[in-house]
Amino acid sequence: MGGTAALRFALDAPQLTRGLVLISPVPASGGGYSPKGEAYLRATAGDPQAARAWLARTFAGTPDEAKLDHVCAAAARADRDASLESFESWAHADFAEATRGIGAPALVIAPQHDVPEMYQHKVAALLPNAQFVVLPEAGHYAILERPRQIAELIRKFLHEASLDSARDDPSKR
């Protein structure tokens, strides 16, 4: 859902968008779920046990309990109606063609154990200045599973795209 928001922001405020880092981004064409998949995801809103079962499947392999607890606690804090509204906003997004006009450099990180082909074809391929990277041994919550590798990918991207702060501020060189 964060990827959809970032893409929308880049379209609505290109003058404020210097670059994008999209990790496991939901495409601007929506989640692509079947009616059964949508019903399942809606049923997890407000149901901690159902949410935990679903969230456990989004990690690569058996999730670390502390990390799963962290994600589940965040989900449990969300109001059910707000969760459903959020789901509708990204699951049915429909502005993919417009993203072809995003000129900012972008890094699309696709976890190996998520759906990297979708991220490549429905996100990275639409962005004219995108780099696409598959992150090995990671699931949808790659930022929790592989934080060091992601940080290194971001550092490299910022440097190569001339977006690192040292280039903007001589005092940081």
Image (tube, grey):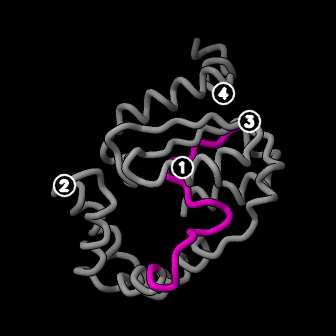
Residue beneath label 3, please? Answer: 129
Count neighbours of disc 4 (C-alpha within 10 A) and say few if under 14, some if 14 to 19, many if 20 or more.
Answer: some
Tell me whether circle 2 and circle 3 mark residues in contact (CB < 8 Å): no
Q: CA distance from mark 3 to mark 1?
A: 18 Å
Mark nearer the N terminus (2 vs 3): 2
Figure quadrant of the C terminus? top right
The label on residue 117 is 1
Q: Looking at the rendered structure, which numbered label has been put on residue 62?
A: 2
The part of the chain drawn in magenta is 19-37
Chain-order first, disc 3 or disc 4: 3
Q: CA distance from mark 3 to mark 4?
A: 14 Å
- For badge 3, the amino acid type reads Asn
Q: Which mark is residue 163?
A: 4
SS type, badge 1: helix
For the point 60% across and 27% down, the residue is: 158
Whether pointer 1 and pointer 2 mark residues with C-beta atoms closer than 8 Å, the reply is no
> Could you tell me how far apart the alpha carbons at marks 1 and 2 are, in whole angstroms?
22 Å
Question: Vertical placement of 81 versus 120: above or below?
Answer: below
Left or right of 38, for residue 52: left
Nearest-to-viewer mark from 1 and 4: 1
**Residue 25 image offset from top left, x and y in percent:** 55, 55
Residue type at mark 1: give it.
Glu
Q: Is residue 14 above or below residue 55?
A: above
Q: CA distance from mark 2 to mark 3?
A: 35 Å
Give the number of the mark in front: 3 or 4: 3
